[in-house]
């Protein structure tokens, strides 16, 4: 079998596994008995949060360099759309829950909510907002590629770390095992991706230049 065809097969298997990890928590939450009898806004808000968590797992894999799961240009294209999708689903998560219960959401945003998970959700939210602002204005701010890469990686790890704690602390419609699975996967993918882009990749390139 040609090497390129073998690589394509391995990538296909990898993406099937990724799709399973990302979709199982969403399906499990959608089928949860806790959804029965709930108001539509509550269901929409909660499910948007579940989808956002799964997208956070997939997002760093779109531009992964070790292993490469998709051509670089296509990966960057989908990574940008993935970022937009994450912002949109988080916005829907907060907006629907605000429409359902304005006081609870305002208490969370003002950091006076009695529930510990609210704090981590707000931390993740503000890191996401800052990332979106920097992504939209990086050229005006004249961020170098290196500085943007570092800032984006730090914020991504903060978004996912706080979002994972937020999700784990919530006892809701998500099934516990699949929730833990996607949380660990998201945290691992984001952390390893940040290390690969900012530390391991540059070290390998420097080593190769020294050998050349």
Image (cartoon, grey):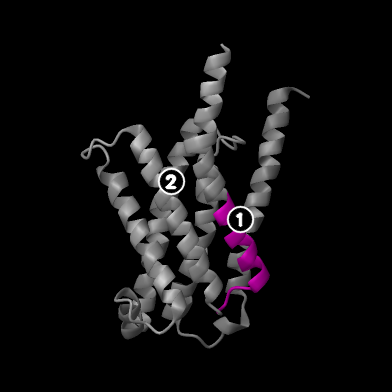
Residues drawn in magenta: 172-188
- Left or right of 202, for residue 180: right
User: In this figure, which residue is indicated by the disc labeled 2?
Assistant: 153
Magenta highlight on residue 138: no
- Left or right of 133, for residue 18: right
Q: Which residue is found at the position 52% from the left and 64% from the top? A: 164
Q: Nearer the viewer, residue 160 or 47?
A: 160
Image quadrant where one finds the N terminus? top right
Q: Which residue is found at the position 51% from the left and 62% from the top? A: 53
Q: Nearer the viewer, residue 136 or 41?
A: 136
- Left or right of 127, for residue 206: right
Where in the figure is residue 74, as x and y percent of width and height? Answer: 49, 35
| Above or below: residue 8 compared with residue 100 | above
- The circle drawn on residue 51 is none
- SS assignment for the magenta stretch, majority: helix
User: In this figure, which residue is indicated by the disc labeled 1?
Assistant: 185
Q: Which residue is found at the position 50% from the left and 32% from the top? A: 72
Residue that sits furthest to the bottom in the current view: 37
Residue 108 in view here? yes
Residue that sits furthest to the right in the current view: 1
Label 2 or label 1, whichever lies nearer to me, is 2
Image quadrant where one finds the C terminus? top right
Q: Secondary structure at mark 2?
A: helix
Q: Nearer the viewer, residue 142 or 24?
A: 142
Q: Secondary structure at mark 1?
A: helix
Residue 52 in view here? no
Badge 2: residue crowd in 10 Å (few <14, some 14–19, many ≥20) = many
Where in the figure is residue 107, as x and y percent of width and height? Answer: 32, 81
């Amino acid at each position: 079998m040609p090497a390129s065809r073998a690589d394509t097969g391995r990538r296909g298997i990898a993406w099937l596994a990724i799709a399973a990890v990302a979709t199982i928590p969403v399906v499990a939450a959608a089928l949860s008995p806790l959804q029965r009898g709930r108001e539509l806004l509550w269901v929409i808000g909660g499910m948007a949060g579940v989808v956002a968590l799964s997208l956070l797992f997939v997002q760093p894999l779109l531009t992964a360099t070790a292993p490469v799961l998709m051509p670089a240009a296509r990966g960057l294209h989908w990574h940008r759309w993935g970022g937009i999708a994450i912002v949109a689903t988080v916005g829907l998560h907060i907006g629907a829950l605000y429409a359902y219960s304005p006081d609870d959401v305002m208490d969370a945003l003002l950091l006076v909510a009695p529930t510990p998970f609210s704090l981590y959700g707000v931390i993740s939210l503000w890191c996401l907002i800052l990332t979106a602002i920097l992504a939209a204005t990086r050229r005006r701010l004249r961020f170098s590629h290196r500085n943007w890469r570092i800032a984006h990686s730090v914020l991504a790890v903060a978004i996912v770390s706080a979002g994972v704690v937020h999700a784990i602390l919530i006892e809701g419609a998500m099934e516990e095992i699949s929730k833990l699975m996607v949380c660990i996967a998201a945290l691992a993918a984001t952390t390893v991706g940040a290390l690969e882009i900012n530390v391991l990749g540059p070290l390998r390139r420097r080593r190769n230049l020294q050998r050349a």
